[in-house]
Amino acid sequence: MSASGTSQFEATLWLPEQLVAGPEGTMLLEALFNGHPDMVILVDAQGRIVAANPQVMEGFGYSREDLEGHSIGILLPEKARERHAGFVAGFMQNPTWRNMHSGLDLSARDSHGTEFQVDVMLRPFFAGGRQYGMAILRRLDTALTRSRAQVRALVESLQDYSINLLDAEGSILTWNEGARRIHGLTASEALGKHVSVLYPGEEPEQARAAAQLEEAARSGRVRSDGWWRGPNGNRIWAEIDLTALRDDTGRLAGFTRVLHDLTRHKEIEDRLRALNAELEQYRLIVENVEEHALYAMDGEGHVASWGLGARKLLGYAPEEVLGKHYSIFATEEDRKAGIPERDLEEAARSGRCFADGWRIYRDGRRRWWSGVISALRDEDGKLTGFVRVARDVTRQKELEESLAQLNADLEARVAERTAQLEATVHELSRKNEEVESFAKVVSRDLKEKEVLLREIHHRVKNNLQVVQSLLKMSARQLPECDARSAVESTVERVHAMSMVHERLYQMPSLSALPLGDYLSDIFAGSIQAYSLAPSQVQLKLDVEEILLPLDRAVPFALLANELLSNSFKHAFPGGRRGAITVSVHRIDGAIRMTVEDDGVGLPADFDPADSNSMGLKLAINLAHQLGGRLEFTSDRGCRVQADLTRM
């Protein structure tokens, strides 16, 4: 733009004809052209420039053609145009005198792009039946501009503060970045609106905004804090400071409204208050625990607190242990071995350490203590100390040691009895082998062999019955104990062998033993041996017609007897009724025998390999002798299965 444009303007009046006529036109002429020191601009209801004085041309470097009909926003920086558009529209709708201090957020820009700060006064102007707005602008000096720019930058940088300037009616005149973040409204959505727009929702909130303005106008300042919900729906804890502004004559000019978002501080305060309450509860609990020794240590293992339970149980007063190392309670041998230090190292490394051992009371007694040491760390993971919780379990320790000694003695006695019974079984087996060898020798003559064999089986059966009777007599002389149970079990085994020989000498053929009849005899003998009613336990036989060779009759008889006896002994306690099913069938290369009952079943931790039962060991050995292995399962009762390959 050339300087000639400005000179031409100065020589030519820039006034619409409808404004010149009448008193208003005269007043306007005086305001614009009779030496007014400030820049004066006239805008219509839409904010378009309709007139300006020479000072505007000089201050902004524009000609009449550049300005006439354009929005007043042409004189503002682009970033401020949207912010002030709503304000200009609000002024035209409700025209009053308004003094706006540009040091907060009013900037101007000339035709060269240079920005500067201005003070602005707005007033309504009526002419020709129309309403106009008159803006009187005064450019600020450079130092003041820089100072106010710094203030504006500071205000914009406060993210937790909503800082607003309101006019006397409560309409919003300024809008900083903190206000946008907290309220969720842009400058165009807030400027020119009544402050009640920041109090959405029900009417009581709207009335609250108006009441605060009235109170601030009356008393000068109103401060409040509490939970507050903004236009964006966010619920925050805020402190609001509303201060009235007055001009030199004392007339109310507007308000400053500062809202400080303290939500984070409130949450921290509430959390700290809750934590303090929780710590107080823990303190009361710790101080009143009497059954356990509960105390704290620092990061080096020195006693830092001494609870009531520790004082009561260990006998030390607080002044005797506070500041002393944790090892003060250990025995001399543990201290020499460095055990207390190792306990603390383990707790620091793993978070906790189970520390059991002998501890020294104040009166010198040694007592066995069991407990845990837990490491304490701060938010950064740094070790800050330890907590020790323990109790005196000396009585339990002594009982455990006594029980261990009793178990050792009992195991020794059982082992001795088992060895004796195994020797008896071995001797009986040897005798039986001798009888069988003798039977083979005399079998050359068929008739003589049959007579002799029947006689032998009869005598063996009688001898075994004698042995059975002797064992019964011995058992009756013994008290109720494991030894008597072992002798009675031997009686059953001898009975099982005697039934083999009884069946053999009664059979027309002496070459083999029929399984079905023999198992029925064993079952009947077990019913009698255990004094059970025949109706209490039923036998279900599913036995294939198999003739058992003589050299396998006794091992099979003993095996069947052990398995049936096990069911009679353990499956039906307290008169429980049930059934035992015995199944014997041929499979490829073996004979499968299954004995199962519907009794109480096996214990949950049953492991035949770990069992000390002589009967179970005998059954396992007999199954191995017959080329098989016992498999135990427990679903609805107990089930034992063996595939015998040497039958």
Image: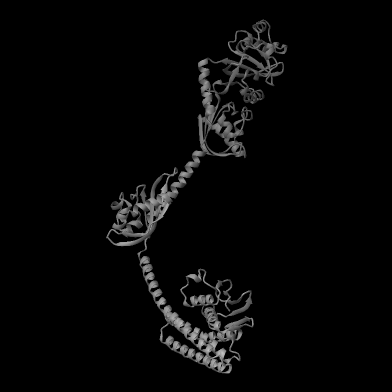
Nearest the eye: 432 or 533: 432
Q: Is residue 406 above or below residue 213?
A: below
Percent position (x, y) of residue 513?
59, 86
Q: Quadrant of the C terminus?
A: bottom right
Q: From what the image shows, is residue 425 above or below residue 248? A: below
Judge from the rendering whether residue 46 lies leftward or rightward of residue 268; answer left or right.
Answer: right
Relative to 524, is 640 above or below? above
Q: Is residue 399 left or right of residue 60?
A: left
- Left or right, residue 334 beside residue 445: left
Percent from the top left, x then y, of residue 303? 33, 50
In the foreground, 503 or 334: 503
In terms of depth relative to the viewer, which is nearer, 402 or 642?
642
User: Residue farthest to the front?
Assistant: 444
Residue 31 seen from this side: yes
Q: Position of residue 283 (x, y in %)?
A: 40, 51
User: Can residue 535 be seen in the rendering of this structure?
Assistant: no
- Quarter placement of the N terminus: top right
Quarter of the view holding residue 541 = bottom right
* Looking at the image, residue 622 lies above or below residue 197: below
Residue at 45 percent of width and 47 percent of height: 275
